[in-house]
Image: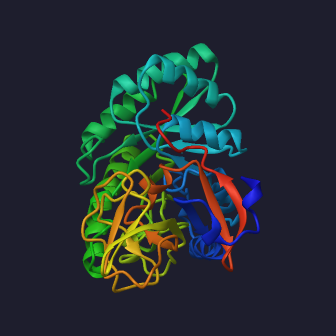
């Protein structure tokens, strides 16, 4: 891959994942600057880009206490790259994974989200056998309707059981307001986020009133960081998409630049105004809508379902073989489809970074 460094991005083989290096760094610096001097700190979410080179730059920018991972394999990739503090913001289940988990806990400071006593007891047994300690965060459901205990007494009951177990440490709570991150109206988003996290804060007070310290509440996102980052009692913000951005998130967090794109090439001009590009759903995350054509507001993708084709209507005067850039609606699932990301500046490739956490790693 090093052979492409210095080449024009339009000369790359396609499809290729691109990131505008200066724009990415401006995003990283902007988020880090927001948290400087605040009690809440960043714990950037690796699931966005899954690239340790980007994670290292997020940590180097300051204001970050460590990284968040969505799965065990991501945490292992981060540790291999020298990251020493990782929260796996998900439940880790199964004997094989627990063996890997406690091995990792012997190398780095590791925390894991749980929402059931079975999680805690299984991790406790594995950690005790390995002679390590794993930090646990009880996940509280504040409206996402996914994992997590109901706020209040159920979380207190579980905390009481955790503190009795060997080789695990009750560190606090995780709460994620994912159902609110795309609320378009900023005032409504702020109000609803405060209401949601009020449940986590009340749970914290309940547990602490029982004499059990709660070291941290971890949660938040890119589009709510300026809300959650100012709420007293929320300690870590798991912002993810801000280094790359996508067109969906840009609508609710316009202060960050869209740095991510997919380079594609025109392979057909079957009808006037229509062009077909050489990338489809196997190369573009599209959960929130079809990709948009960078630099051509009038061009649009009416439907996006082919595996290796993207039909663009009202296309510009492209010729067969011309290069075009697409902006995905979902950066996280787009990065997961690639093994390499091409870093560019002023139209030329300046580096190529592996995406170590991509694919179906468990």
Give how far across and how far down residue 33 sits, in percent. Answer: 62, 75
Nearer to me, 277 or 90: 277
Q: Residue at the location (73% across, 44% down)?
A: 82
Please state if 19 lies on the left or on the right of 266 as rendered.
right
Q: Is residue 117 left or right of residue 88?
A: left
Pick the residue in front: 348 or 157. Answer: 348
On screen, 91 above or below 7? above
Outermost residue to the top: 129
Q: Is residue 56 visible?
A: no
User: Percent position (x, y) of residue 154?
Assistant: 26, 37
**Residue beneath the point at 49% across and 60% down:** 240
Camera-nearest residue between 263 and 228 = 263
Q: Is residue 252 above or below residue 290?
A: below
Indicate the quadrant where residue 185 lies.
Answer: bottom left
Q: Is residue 328 visible?
A: yes
Image: 254 above or below 357: below
**Figure quadrant of residue 271:** bottom left
Residue 22 percent location from the top left of the image: 66, 76
Please tell me which residue is depicted at 38% across the width and 31% down the height of the picture: 160
Q: Identify which residue is drawn at 37% across, 85% down.
A: 297
Q: Quadrant of residue 187?
A: bottom left
In screen coordinates, is 340 left or right of 348? left
The correct choice, above or below, for 150 with respect to 127 in the image is below
The front one of 129 and 335 is 335
């Amino acid at each position: 891959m090093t052979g492409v460094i210095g080449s024009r991005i339009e000369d790359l083989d396609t499809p290729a994942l691109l990131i505008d290096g200066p724009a990415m760094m401006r995003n990283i610096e902007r988020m880090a600057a927001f948290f400087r001097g605040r009690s809440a700190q960043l714990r950037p979410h690796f699931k966005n880009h899954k690239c340790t080179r980007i994670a290292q730059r997020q940590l180097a920018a300051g204001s970050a206490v460590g990284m968040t991972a969505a799965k065990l394999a991501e945490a292992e990739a981060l540790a291999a790259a020298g990251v020493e503090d990782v929260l796996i913001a998900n439940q880790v289940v199964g004997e094989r994974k627990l063996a890997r988990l406690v091995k990792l806990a012997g190398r780095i400071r590791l925390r894991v989200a749980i929402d059931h006593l079975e999680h805690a007891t299984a991790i406790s047994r594995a950690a005790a056998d390995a002679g390590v300690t794993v930090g646990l965060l009880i996940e509280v459901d504040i409206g996402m309707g996914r994992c997590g205990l109901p706020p209040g007494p159920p979380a207190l009951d579980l905390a009481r059981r955790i503190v009795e177990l060997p080789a695990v440490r009750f560190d606090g709570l995780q709460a994620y307001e994912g159902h609110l991150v795309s609320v378009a109206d900023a005032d409504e988003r702020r109000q609803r986020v405060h209401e949601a996290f009020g449940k986590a804060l009340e749970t914290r007070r309940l547990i602490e009133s029982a004499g059990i310290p709660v070291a941290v509440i971890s949660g938040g996102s890119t589009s709510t960081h300026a809300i959650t980052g100012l709420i007293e009692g929320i300690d870590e913000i798991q912002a993810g998409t801000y280094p790359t951005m996508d067109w969906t998130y840009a609508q609710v967090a316009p202060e960050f630049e869209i740095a991510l794109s997919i380079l594609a090439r025109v392979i057909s001009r079957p009808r006037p105004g229509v062009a077909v590009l050489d990338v489809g759903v196997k190369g573009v995350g599209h959960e929130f809508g079809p990709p948009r054509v960078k630099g051509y507001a009038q061009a649009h993708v009416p439907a996006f379902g082919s595996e290796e084709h993207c039909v663009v209507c009202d296309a510009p005067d492209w010729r067969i073989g011309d290069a075009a850039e697409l902006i995905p609606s979902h950066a996280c699932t787009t990065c997961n489809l690639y093994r390499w990301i091409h870093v560019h500046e002023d139209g030329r490739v300046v580096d190529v970074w592996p995406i170590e956490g991509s694919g179906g790693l468990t």
